[in-house]
Amino acid sequence: MFYLSRIEHKLPLPPSRLALPIREAIHMELEKLFLDKVIAELGLCISVYDIRSIEGGFVFPGDGAPTYTVVFNLIMFRPFVGEIISAKLLSSDADGIRLTLGFFDDIYVPAHHLPTSNHFVADLVNSKNGIWFWDYDEQSYPIDAADEIKFQVQSVSYPPIPVEQPKESKPFAPMLVTGSLDHDGLGPVSWWYAEEEAKEEE
């Protein structure tokens, strides 16, 4: 889920940073540039792990800041296909559910990847939202925000940045994780505790 990625980057250092020790100044500028940003095929930057080398410091004609060539490691979040991750429910609608890890919210489980059999109950106030239920052994088990939810990663994609977006469309997500709950042990953890307790009572 988390990786170290080594990057080489030409970094102009703003004059406002020049009063600081060079390594500290460059670390701060790298965090400003990369922290919480998605790099295609690498994932979401969680932190600047370390700086391996700093070279240069040249002021090019027409520039008001020195430029350094910096080699550094970033801690990246990039789940792999088949990985099982615990998350929390963020929202639920007729198309499926959206999950969050706290630092990353663009995890979607479409309706066809929810446990079979299932049904959706729309909210009385806002019919676009509601609750999904897993129907099993004449019982209905809800997918709600009270539980930790385990999902399996189906795909990780990096959509191209749209030129225009309709007003009604979802906010653009530079990295999308598609998940599945349709397997034993996946879904809200309380489902499986309830099933174990039922077996013990029998």
Image (cartoon, rainbow, N blue to C red):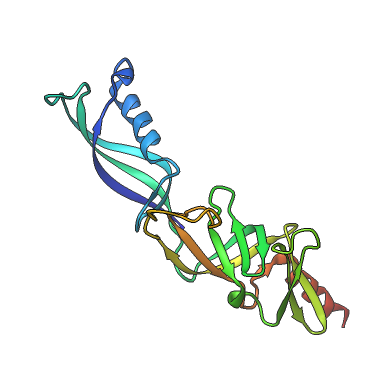
Kindly indicate the quadrant of the structure image that contains residue 117.
Answer: bottom right
Total labels: the figure holds 0
Q: Residue at x 77, y 72 (%)?
A: 141
Q: Is residue 33 above or below residue 108?
A: above
* 110 and 73: which is toward the camera: 110
Up the image or down, 58 lies above or below 92; here it is above
Quadrant (top left/top right/bottom left/bottom right) for the C terminus: bottom right
Q: Nearer the viewer, residue 41 or 61?
A: 61
Left or right of 150 in this view: 2: left
Give percent across and percent down for residue 139: 82, 79
| Front-lying residue, 108 or 93 | 93
User: Could you say which quadrant of the image residue 157 lies in?
Assistant: bottom left
Q: Is residue 60 left or right of residue 117?
A: left
Seen at 44% across and 64% down, the residue is 156
At 67% across and 63% down in the image, what residue appears?
92
- Residue 54 image position (x, y, % from top left): 22, 32
Residue with the most extreme top position: 19
Q: Residue furthest left?
A: 61
Asked which quadrant contains residue 136, the reply is bottom right
Vertically, is 9 above or below 125? above
Residue 151 place in picture, x, y as percent: 59, 67
12 in relation to 194, above or below: above
- Residue 15: give x, y in percent of width and height: 28, 19
Please tell me which residue lies in front, 18 or 96. 96
